[in-house]
Amino acid sequence: MPTIKDVAKLSQTSVGTVSRYLNGYHLKAANQARIEKAIKELNFNINPIARGLKTNKTKTVGVLVPELSNTFSAHVIEGMEQVFDEHGYSLLVCNSRNNPNVESEKLRLLRDKLVDGIILMSVQDLGGHIREIQENGLPIVLIDRLITDLSCDGVVSDNVNGAYRAVEVIINRGHKRIGIIAGPQEIYTAKERLEGYLRALKDYNIPVDESLICEGHYTQAGGAQALDFLWERPEPPTAVFVCNNDMVVGAVKCISSKELTIGKDISLFGYDQLEFSQIVKPPLSLVIQPIEEIGRRAAEMLVRRLEGDFSGFPVVQRLKTEMVVTDSVQTVT
Amino acid sequence: MPTIKDVAKLSQTSVGTVSRYLNGYHLKAANQARIEKAIKELNFNINPIARGLKTNKTKTVGVLVPELSNTFSAHVIEGMEQVFDEHGYSLLVCNSRNNPNVESEKLRLLRDKLVDGIILMSVQDLGGHIREIQENGLPIVLIDRLITDLSCDGVVSDNVNGAYRAVEVIINRGHKRIGIIAGPQEIYTAKERLEGYLRALKDYNIPVDESLICEGHYTQAGGAQALDFLWERPEPPTAVFVCNNDMVVGAVKCISSKELTIGKDISLFGYDQLEFSQIVKPPLSLVIQPIEEIGRRAAEMLVRRLEGDFSGFPVVQRLKTEMVVTDSVQTVT
DNA sequence: TTGTATGCGTTATCAA
DNA sequence: TTGATAACGCATACAA
């Protein structure tokens, strides 16, 4: 691999001049031409490691999510990649495996690898390990989940409102016994969606029946178990709001195995766009998050910080959700 | 950020000794203790950039795929991340957006960022740009798709056999007019799966009817259009083999919109594990690739190369597919 | 506008 | 076993 030294020699200039050329300074046309020629001839490429050692910038950002293979992570990463790519940043992608300890470890790894900034979907509502990183001067943008005791930029979707409007639809279609398959209450989004549910019931004067509130893991199994549990109640709900995409899949599988018909035997309102939502009969009613947009916004925010614009810190963007309403929620009279 | 210089000073040793400690050399117990104490006290972390400048190793590998948000990419990355993590490698993830030019560009970017090796799911059957990288001494492992004119390690699944066995099942259930929704023939897997289809027909003496072979993009729209096309034939097929997960989704949607019943009006055999395959009625018959295993194997192979073991180059692993057979393929008499 | 020289934080070579 | 010092490839302060 040729270095600027080689370029300097071949172009009969000096390393300083070559370096200046590479950094966009203006120089005498003749020199510029000779340097350009030499660069081409040698097939020279700048060595970002060496550059990084000087500048303390790597043009790399860290992305840390709880799981790489789920749709949410994949789409949010796809979204941010577009923006980062435009701005010349590469993505160092890490997986915290839903484990707080791994999260802390990876966060340190990212700092040590000298990323310029970090996008984090955290698995816990504790900010100590994150604050430590912030104190190193690394900008961090949270996605999907905010952290109570942490002052940090973030991009999330409006879970309370999303859930509220879904439950509102269910109520307006005449249901009184409305179950919810909520996520683990340590998770920010799960807490918010449950809150939306509770607020809607309250606003419409429907008493809260604790036995219709079921907490499950954000997994297919969690959704299936929860639906099973709700359905086995002495007085099962006539409609169920399911708070997460994986849980929806599980719930639908469970309903299917019970030979029940959605929108007739039981009404269902799900969360997030699902591959199969239009294939199931009837198509599913859904709260839909702008997942890729969350990624793009988060990336844009981080880029702003990386460019030195710290205005308004901490900025939290709360993106609106869309809603699809279908016959999966029966109208009862 | 403290450096080894600070550690040396505080521990009253020299940078050389500290460096040796960090690299696992043995030193006098007393010095070791003092260094360890100093490291803790200063909260010292090694600077991998500086280290990389000396060693020309970054402990980072590049991953380049055509799309980040699809299930295949996501799962294959999840798989390889496990292995790389165990070996201390981080992942620099890039997106070629199904564009050969972007692929070449990103490949150069990865080289310039000095990754130690690359995992590549290529979007074209041309190896020039890849060979160029190999010549820089960077180990590359191809996944999912091999490249004809390129000598390179690779991990793929046995597409020919997977398709063959699926079509064999269809034939054994008595079908004679078997359609295939094949992918774009520039794509390695698409070509191989079509070949499996053709071989099965040949082995069972079923004449090939070109009008039942339909090429579509590896997308939902591609699958839907293709199914529509096949179904509108004067003599439509009684069974269709769909060669890719996205196309299966499209095909099922199309069938659904036509109010046809799978396994009765039309038999269907799909590819890859789908979230909804068990929800659809009847559940879908599928060829299932070991996607995460492909990722793991590829990572293991690359790690071997990175550790200097170049035995058997080029090694191509062809992983077996699984198969699920259901009533989505009708038995005709 | 350009060349020279220094330093970024490591590793590696050489003496001791 | 250790310390001093020269690289690694680049950016930059300073002098010219």
Image (spheres, coloured by chain):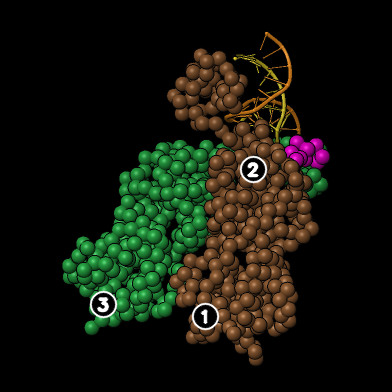
Chain colours: A brown, B green, C yellow, D orange
Q: Amino acid at mark 2?
A: Val
* Callout 2: chain: A
Q: Nearer the viewer, residue A126 or B133?
A: A126
Labelled disc at residue B263: none
Q: Amino acid at mark 1?
A: Ile
Q: Residues within 10 Å of mark 1 (few under 14, many from 20)?
A: many
Tell me if residue B266 comes above or below residue A309 in the rendering.
below
SS of the residue at dot 3? helix
Q: Position of residue B207 (x, y in %)?
A: 17, 67
Q: Nearer the viewer, mark 1 or mark 3?
A: 1
SS of the residue at dot 2? helix
Q: Which residue is mark 2?
A: A303
Q: Which residue is mark 3?
A: B172
Q: Is residue A7 visible?
A: yes
Q: CA distance from mark 1 to mark 3?
A: 36 Å
Q: Residue at x 64, y 63 (%)?
A: A98
What's the magenta bit mostly, secondary-structure-wise? helix
Labelled disc at residue A262: 1
Quarter of the picture holding the C terminus of chain A? bottom right
* Callout 1: chain: A
Q: Amino acid at mark 3?
A: Asn
Q: Which residues are magenta?
A: B1-11
User: Residue B156 appears in which quarter of the rendering?
Assistant: bottom left
Q: CA distance from mark 3 to mark 2?
A: 58 Å
Q: Nearer the viewer, mark 3 or mark 2?
A: 2
